Image: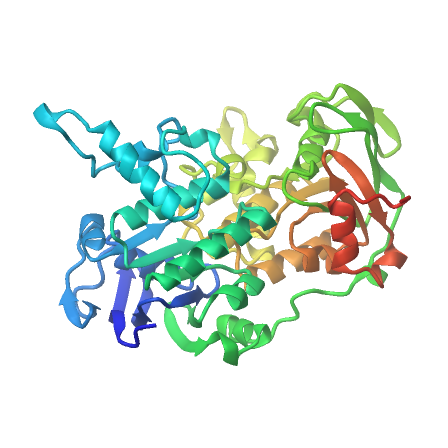
């Protein structure tokens, strides 16, 4: 590893109207180094990287960027590419209906005589970089037919073709399976050996300690510290990120007043589900565990009426119900916080208030107008209850951090006062502080008698928050872990069921 810094960002500040989001940040990175960048949502991580990537300008009154000791000006994305900076965003920026090689050369196409594109040459160069990375897909494949992990590798190949020396990865594993994460880590090790530096943004502690050499922590736009990964533990990192000690998980099952059964599902079957049966009682937090593709989300969508079922019955509070669509589900007192909040959970070009009160609109319609006072009362109640950070109730929801967006989505459903709420990956992509607040809210809902179904890929989250756990594999339930069994359950036992093992074997 070369000891000289390849990149130095010195005294970097950034001010948006009414708010200073970065204050005098120093960030130094060596070639071949994997640097984790950590902090709560809104800490300034993305802003700092967007300045590096030429998306944002730094404040004019200070700050400079050096590449190999020489000061450079990065005014746009082209400048960043010129200096070897490439950013792989959490939402992948690929043209899904085009080929891999088209995506790799987009904006930098190779031309032959008379201005025609040289597809043969681009395909050849693309295939060479794909094979160099040890990947198995072909340069002429359509991107939409690749897995999410393979699409992520396309972004990495694109960075390498642009001769990137620094690659920023923003939450790269949020949609990957365990095997795909391992593949990504293999590629990161190859990049390190090629003297390429990686900035790795993630909230997943196990990944941070597995892959990073060093860790930079930001809090409220300030640099807290840069430490060697081998010299700190997760509790110390959390305290640096949030400024206080946090009990990440609450042991609470004995406090929950478990009541009568509020939901029973029997023999739910469709193309993705095979005879799925389970039940939930009032005041329970029922966890659903399993690997990606096991059928957990498909179960939630079927219960909520989004996906059709071919057979099976649903009972709410002991009464058989027919749920053909989301309106039917809401009418039965069921709420659903989806896994993909940006595409299914929010209306990005509408305000926070609009998103939060949309489902209870009928409560404050007055004639042909809106009872603004009543609408504001609902907004104030839930924004205060969930400690949502915002500048104005009319602020566009897309401008909030991921954690605050998630709180708005949960608030939207709480305002409907559901008897049953389904939470699909409720803490995915949000920081530890926001996670803790979501955990407290889940427990609070259960204490108020709501039946909670929580789907999560985080084992510690599932084990510590659930009163019971169902484990799924290939569209069927392979195991149920009772409250008593939870006291001695291990992650290995859950993985046994999640890999197809059956309780009766």
Q: What residue do we see at 30% from left, 52% from top?
A: 86
Pick whichever, 172 or 237, lies toward us.
Answer: 172
Q: Quadrant of residue 336?
A: top right
The location of residue 36, given as percent across then percent down, is 44, 66
Q: Quadrant of residue 334?
A: top right
Question: Would residue 445 appear left or right of 46 to someone viewing this image?
Answer: right
Relative to residue 474, is residue 404 depicted above or below? below
Residue farthest to the top?
310
The location of residue 211, given as percent across then percent down, is 49, 64
Q: What residue do we see at 45% from left, 65% from top?
A: 38
Question: Would residue 240 appear left or right of 419 to someone viewing this image?
Answer: left
User: So how many labels did they put on this image?
Assistant: 0
Indicate the colouring scheme.
Answer: rainbow
The location of residue 37, given as percent across then percent down, is 42, 65
Q: Quadrant of the C terminus?
A: top right
Question: Would residue 497 appear left or right of 77 to someone viewing this image?
Answer: right
Relative to residue 158, is residue 437 depicted above or below? below
Pick whichever, 311 or 144, lies toward us.
Answer: 144
Question: Would residue 224 appear left or right of 276 to someone viewing this image?
Answer: left
Q: What residue do we see at 62% from left, 71% from top?
A: 246
Mark yes or no: residue 11 visible. Answer: no
Residue farthest to the bottom?
231
Mark yes or no: residue 265 visible. Answer: yes
Q: Quadrant of the N terminus?
A: bottom left
Relative to residue 459, is residue 112 depicted above or below? above
Relative to residue 387, is residue 505 depicted above or below? above
Residue farthest to the left?
114
The location of residue 332, given as percent across then percent down, is 75, 30
Pick whichever, 194 or 25, lies toward us.
Answer: 194
Q: Quadrant of residue 478?
A: top right
């Amino acid at each position: 590893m070369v000891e000289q810094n390849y990149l130095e960002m010195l005294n970097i500040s950034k001010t948006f109207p009414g708010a200073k989001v970065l204050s005098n940040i120093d960030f130094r990175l060596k070639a071949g180094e994997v640097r984790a960048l950590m902090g709560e949502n809104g800490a300034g991580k993305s802003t700092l990287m967007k300045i590096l990537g030429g998306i944002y300008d730094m404040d004019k009154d200070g700050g400079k960027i050096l590449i190999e000791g020489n000061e450079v000006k990065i005014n746009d994305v082209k400048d960043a590419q010129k200096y070897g900076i490439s950013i792989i965003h959490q939402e992948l920026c690929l043209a899904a209906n085009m080929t891999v090689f088209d995506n790799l050369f987009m904006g930098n196409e190779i031309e032959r005589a008379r201005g025609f594109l040289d597809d043969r040459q681009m395909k050849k160069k693309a295939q060479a970089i794909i094979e160099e990375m040890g990947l198995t897909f072909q340069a002429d494949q359509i991107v939409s037919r690749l897995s999410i992990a393979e699409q992520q590798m396309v972004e990495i190949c694109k960075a390498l073709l642009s001769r990137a020396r620094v690659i920023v990865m923003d939450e790269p594993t949020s949609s990957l399976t365990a095997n795909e994460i391992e593949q990504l880590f293999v590629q990161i090790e190859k990049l390190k050996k090629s003297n390429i530096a990686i900035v790795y943004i993630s909230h997943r502690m196990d990944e941070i300690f597995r892959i990073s050499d060093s860790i930079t922590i930001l809090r409220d736009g300030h640099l807290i510290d840069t430490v060697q990964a081998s010299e700190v533990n997760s509790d110390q990192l959390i305290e640096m990120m949030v400024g206080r000690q946090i009990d990440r998980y609450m042991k609470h099952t004995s406090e929950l007043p478990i009541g009568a059964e509020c939901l029973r599902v029997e023999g739910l079957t469709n193309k993705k589900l095979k005879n799925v049966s389970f039940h939930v009682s009032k005041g329970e937090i029922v966890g659903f565990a399993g690997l990606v593709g096991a059928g957990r989300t498909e179960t939630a969508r079927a219960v909520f009426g989004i996906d059709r079922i071919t057979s099976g019955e649903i009972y709410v509070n002991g009464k058989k119900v027919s749920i053909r669509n989301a309106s039917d589900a809401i009418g039965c007192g069921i709420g659903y916080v989806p896994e993909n909040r940006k595409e299914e959970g929010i209306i990005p070009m509408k305000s926070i208030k609009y998103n939060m009160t949309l489902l209870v609109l009928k409560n404050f319609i007055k004639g042909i107008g809106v009872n603004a006072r009543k609408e504001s009362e609902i907004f104030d109640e839930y924004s205060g209850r969930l400690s949502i950070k915002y500048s104005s109730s009319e602020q566009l929801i897309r401008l909030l951090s991921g954690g605050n967006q998630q709180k708005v989505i949960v608030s939207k459903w709480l305002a409907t006062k559901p008897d049953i709420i389904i939470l699909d990956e409720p803490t995915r992509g949000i920081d530890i502080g926001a996670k803790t607040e979501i955990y407290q809210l889940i427990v609070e809902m259960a204490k108020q008698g709501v039946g909670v179904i929580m789907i999560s890929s985080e084992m510690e989250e599932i084990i510590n928050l659930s009163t019971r756990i169902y484990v799924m594999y290939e569209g069927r339930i392979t195991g149920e872990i009772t409250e008593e069994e939870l006291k001695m359950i291990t992650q290995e036992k859950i993985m046994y069921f999640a890999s197809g093992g059956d309780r009766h074997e």
